[in-house]
Image (cartoon, grey):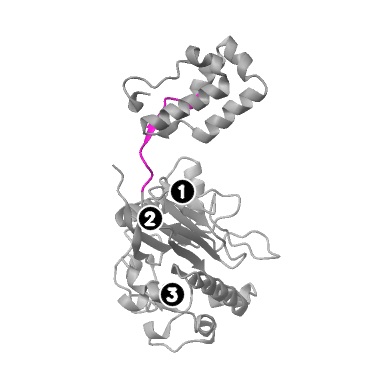
Amino acid sequence: PSVPINKLVAVHLNIEGIRSSVSLHRRGHFSIKQRCLAELLRLQNADIVGLTETHLLPSDVLTGVDGYHVFPAPCGKPRILPGCDPHPSGGVAILVSERIPIERITLCGDDGDHGSVWIHVASDDGHLVHVGVCYSEDRNSAQARRIDMGLLWSVRRNTLLQKIGSREAVLFMGDMNSHVPSLHHAPTTAFDSVMHSALDGVPLHLLNTMCAQPTFFPTTAAASGQPCLPEQHTPTCIDLAYVSLPHKDMFELEVPPLTHLVSRHRPLVVTVHLSSPISAPPPAVSVGGGCKFRLRLLEQEDVQRAVRSSMEASVDQWLSEHGSTLPSTPASVQRAYSEFAAICHTVLRDKLELSLPSGGPRHA
């Protein structure tokens, strides 16, 4: 029996480029980054995963994430700057587990060219959790590419106000590349102040203040838990998770070390306690080979005559809507069979023997 989902586990990881991994997988190999990502999904039992700095181009397909839907398909949102040639830098993607019914997920915008992707996840009572994943350039990249960070953060501010204005829970996480004064001893720079000024007055709560752990390290070894060397820079906290202030008690944050040396960033693991559950999809009964069934059907001469021209299109439409799985209740299986028989021709009903088998729907 299916078990309702009472909490969501949302993970963010700046993976620092997965494009070479996608190329390897296309040739039949799994890279260390893909193994790390798969292990992270398994260990955290992740429902939603935000990846930043994917370094993917529009022509790429994010692979090696079986059991997850990719938003936006097929590779997330590449970072393509206006007036520039496609360059594998930046890029964000949201992965959503197939445990969550696809009809409960809505891709609701990607802020144009502003490095963010947003989805809605609906619970059984219709309430939504808004989840946004963001990658924001660091100071050097912003200067080199002449990005107006003030304008960019103004767009993000407006998006956050719109989401919070819906009175639904909001989770906004990613690599912001800005330091928060309460998490650092060093003074705030002018570059950091751009984000702080934009978020000033927005009713948000920073989850990182709950654990005050660094997220960005000088080496991949340090990110996996090994000590930093004295000459290396001090670990900082630039991967941030903000939540809507009225809903802050719904969220918990952990920052575990990585198990593989694949990124200098540690993941943010956010647990979301839902006010109402998300029911898993109802169990389905497999009806052996819908396509093969259609081919066997078309071998009958009288069926060929019946489905020729417009009738064949109707059969294709029925198969595309119902697929090779049907609801498990006998009544609905019987209705589906009857509907198919009506499409072909009522005269053919006896010949096609579309009555429900005596063994019940599992023997259909």
In the image, residue 109 lies at what x, y percent?
Answer: 57, 61
Of mark 1 and mark 3, the one earlier in the sequence is 1
- Residue 150 falls within the magenta-colored stretch: no
Q: Secondary structure at mark 2?
A: loop
Q: CA distance from mark 2 to mark 1?
A: 12 Å
Q: Disc 2 marks which amino acid?
A: Asp
In the image, residue 156 lies at what x, y percent?
Answer: 55, 73
Tell me whether the residue at label 2 lies in contact with that at label 3, contact meaning CB atoms closer than 8 angstroms.
no
Q: Disc 3 marks which amino acid?
A: Ile
* Above or below: residue 140 compared with residue 171: below
* Above or below: residue 190 compared with residue 55: below
Q: Secondary structure at mark 1?
A: helix
Tell me whether the residue at label 2 lies in contact with that at label 1, contact meaning CB atoms closer than 8 angstroms.
no
Count of picture labels: 3
Disc marking residue 102 = 1
Q: Which of the 4 quarters of the picture holds residue 346?
A: top right
User: Magenta stretch?
Assistant: 280-291
Name the residue that disc number 2 marks.
47
Of mark 2 and mark 1, the one earlier in the sequence is 2
At 48% from the left and 59% from the top, the residue drawn is 120
Q: CA distance from mark 2 to mark 3?
A: 23 Å
Residue 105 in view? yes
At 35% from the left and 62% from the top, the residue drawn is 274
In the image, residue 22 lies at what x, y percent?
Answer: 50, 49
